[in-house]
Every structure is written in C-alpha cells, then in structure tokens.
Image (cartoon, rainbow, N blue to C red):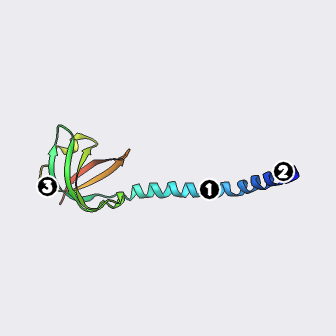
Amino acid sequence: MKAIKKILLISAMSLGVTWPLISSAQAMMDHGTSSMSGAAMMTDGEVRKVDQAAGKVTIKHGDIKHLDMPGMTMVFTAKDKSVLNNVKPGDKIKFMAVTEGGKFFVSDIQPEK
C-alpha cells in the first residue's frame, strides 16, 4: 500500500511540475497560430471564370503560402458575393484565400496594379 501511495505522490508532483510547461507550450502555439493568420497575405492570380449567381470564382493562382498550397487553378466560393462584382475573366488580381471547415473561400479580391 505504501508503494502505491508513493507512486501516486510522485505522479501528482510530476504533473504539478509539467502542467505549467504544457500550458506555456499551448499558449506559444496559440500565439504562433495568430501570428500566422496575421502573416496571411494576398496571392497573385488571374480570374478564369465568374459565376456571380453561385458566388463562385475560378482563379489560376500562384502559391498560397499561408495555406501551404501550391499554385493551381481552382474554384473558390466567395465569403461575400459582392467581392465578385468588379471582376471578369482575364483580370489579373491579388486575392485573400481562407479556409473554414475544410473549405476554401476567397474573402477579398483586388485588381492588380
């Protein structure tokens, strides 16, 4: 019985020492995530197709670094259909891509200068 008490005591003490470390690591990871989202940047692209009614846009784009995505052509759903009002196929753009629930969205589109 004494051996079990010692094991429990040592385990509790060990957890008491490591718990603050785990919390600190989590806080650092959360901070790193917020820094990464803050580091999200606009990506160069070219509009290939716009479906205003469906709120979708096909964009040929370069690497989307903050999403770790290589360049390709893909269809994005607009977070707000109004971002599609001033774009047409062939337009060179800069856009912001985001992901929510495993789906990719475009949240901002700016004409390239």
The residue furthest right is 2
Dot placed on the residue nearer the N-terminal end, 1 or 2 = 2
Residue 86 visible in the displayed image: no
Helix or strand or loop: what does disc 1 sit on?
Answer: helix
Give the percent coordinates (x, y) of residue 37.
40, 55
Check if mark 1's residue and mark 3's residue have beta carbons within 8 Å.
no
1 vs 3, front mark = 1
Front residue of 68/31: it is 68
Give the residue type at disc 3. Asp
Under mark 1, the amino acid is Ile
The quadrant of the picture occupied by the C terminus is bottom left
The CA span between labels 2 and 3 is 72 Å
Residue position for label 2 = 5
Q: In terms of depth relative to the viewer, which is nearer, 38 or 24?
A: 24
Q: Earlier in the sequence, mark 1 or mark 3?
A: 1
Is 65 rendered above or below residue 74? below
Q: Which residue is mark 3?
A: 91
Q: Secondary structure at mark 3?
A: loop
Q: Identify which amino acid the numbered label 2 is placed on.
A: Lys
Whichever of labels 2 and 3 marks the residue nearer the N terminus, that label is 2
Front position among marks 1 and 2: 2
- The residue that label 1 is drawn on is 22
In the image, is 6 to the left or to the right of 69? Answer: right
Q: Which label sits on residue 80?
A: none
Nearer to the camera, 94 or 3? 3
Q: Where on the picture, by quarter, is residue 85?
A: top left
Q: Residue at x 14, y 49 (%)?
A: 49
Image location of residue 100, percent across then percent down: 37, 45
